[in-house]
Structures are given as structure tokens and as C-alpha cells.
Amino acid sequence: MPEGDVLRRTAAHLDRALAGRRLVRADLRWPTAATVDLTGRTVLGTRPYGKHLLTRFDDGRTLHTHLRMDGTWRLVPTTAQRAAARSPQVRAVLGDERWTALGYQLGMLDVVRTSAERTLLGHLGPDVLDGDFDTTPGVPWAGPPVLDLPTPGIEEALRRWATQGSRPVAEVLLDQRVVVGIGTIFMAESLFARGWWPWARADDVVDADEVLRSARALLRASVATGRPSSAVYGRAGRACTRCGAQVARGDVGAPPTQRQVYWCPGCQVRGRR
């Protein structure tokens, strides 16, 4: 599933094409939104929040989308044949005279009042990539806040972490109710960076703040470069670049929602750092 870095780049991509532009075409191919007409509305911008996208309009409405596993937003010139969007995989079309954004295989789609965005996302934790998550520099995003959380958001994330007890730390990092934007790639990479075994108890992780800061730094680097780092993720059976041990792969969580996890048995010793 795309993680916070992909959503940041997607939002920036949509903004470069459509922010400040009036739509000449809008087609939402979703049962609960099929009658919604956004034609003529001006796009204020797209706000990423974790793995969610909030495209805001000048009439006080927001288009909420989630990519899930296979979704993507693609931009094509409005005059191109592909802009006709005849594919049954297209779930949303937003276009002005120059560019048309096509939402393929979107996993969620809602249209709500911008003031009601919290009704969709209020259960989530703070976004690890938000500018006010930590005192370290971040990228501010314009427009109303999504959630009314304490600043810096890392304090709220640590408060939620502290309630997780004996849950494996890998599960906690993947739990969007604790902190949003981290998926399997950056869960694995941030735990490797801090030397924690993925199944260590959350309440044994004495430097949870530094684990979150590592995830934030790695995600921010991926936003900037367009590619995530990979010290352990996807490297099962290969030598660890730090100690030479063979990178291992396992599962975290319970079926049917278990997720893959990669770790180094040499650097991330069972039960301790």
C-alpha cells in the first residue's frame, strides 16, 4: 500500500496541475457520489494526510480519496485521447482546459463539507510528515487543519503509543490510529535504524520518539528523492549492509490483516536492542 511519501508526491503532482484552476469537467464514478457535480468549481489544493488525500474546492466541499493497494492518480493533457477516461478502472475525473486528473482503482471516495473532514479522519493519529509533527523542519501544507491535535504532533503520537502495552512495536508503527503515514517499508527501515526487533513490546521501546523521528526522516528523504531507502525492506536472504547477517522476513499481526516485515537478526536482536 502506498505510504505517506507517495501521497505527498501525489498531492504535489495534483496541485501543480489543478490548484487554482476551474474545473471544466468532473466525473465521480462512485455509487455514493455519482450525482455530485464539481464542474465549474475551483480547486484550492490537495492536502495529504497520512494515506488519505483531501482535494478542497472553493464552495467549501472536499473530495476525499484513498489509494488502498492499487489506486493511483494520473495526469494527462486534456486534449489527449486518454483524457476521455473510458477505462472501467477510472473512478474519478477532474479536468481543466490543460490537464485532466484520472483516479484509477481508488479504494475510497467521499465528498463532504471541508468543515466535516474530521468525520472521516477523526480516528487517526497525527501525520508523521506534517510540518508541526516535530520541532525538526517539515513541509507546511496550506489550508485548514485536518485534525485538532496538540502541537507538536509527536507528543500526541507518543501518548497513543504509551497505551499500546505489549503489542509488537511493528504493529504499533503500522497502526494509523497511533500515527499516520507509515507502512511496511518505513516500519521496517525505522526499526532497523534504531536497532529494534519488530516483535519487541511497545512498552519496552525506550526511545519511541527517536523511532518516530527516524521514520519521519526516512519518509521526508523519499519525498525529496522520489525513492525510499532500502536497508532491509525487500532484501530477505541478502547480506545486511551493516553487519553482514542474512536479512530475514516474517509476518506481523493476525490473519487476515498480517503484514510482511523485514529485519536483520544481527542488528535487531530478539528482545533487546
Image (cartoon, rainbow, N blue to C red):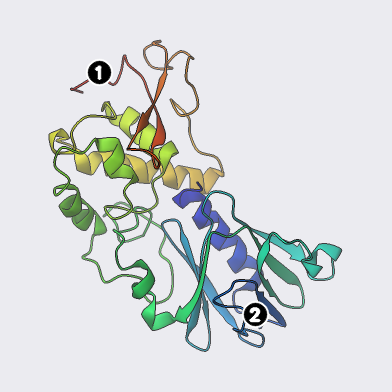
Labels 1 and 2 touching (C-beta < 8 A): no
Q: Residue furthest front?
A: 256
User: In the rendering, at what x and y percent does residue 115 appear?
Assistant: 38, 82
Residue 62 lies, in percent from the top left, at: 49, 78
Q: How many numbered marks does the figure carry?
A: 2
Reply above or below: 248 against 48.
above
Residue 15 at x, y percent in the picture:
59, 68
User: Label 2 is placed on what type of residue?
Assistant: Arg
Q: Nearer the viewer, residue 40 or 224?
A: 40
**Residue at position x 44%, y 72% in the image:** 142
SS label for mark 2: loop
- Disc number lying in front (1 or 2): 1
x 37%, y 38%: residue: 255
Q: Residues within 10 Å of mark 1 (few under 14, many from 20)?
A: some
**Side of 32 where 248 appears, left or right:** left
Q: Residue at x 25, y 37 (%)?
A: 169
Q: Residue at x 18, y 22 (%)?
A: 271
Tag shown at residue 269: 1
Q: Nearer the viewer, residue 65 or 10?
A: 65
What residue type is disc 1 on?
Val
Say which label, 1 or 2, has the lower sequence index.
2
Question: Percent x, y for residue 264?
Answer: 36, 19
- Looking at the rendering, which quadrant does residue 241 occupy? top left
- Regarding mark 1 in the picture, which secondary structure is present there? loop
Q: CA distance from mark 1 to mark 2?
A: 53 Å
Circle 2 packing at 10 Å, graded few (<14), some (14-19), many (20+), is many
Quarter of the C terminus within the rendering: top left
Instruction: Tell me if residue 104 comes above or below residue 264 in the rendering.
Output: below
Camera-side residue of 232 and 224:
232
Label of residue 21 in the image: 2
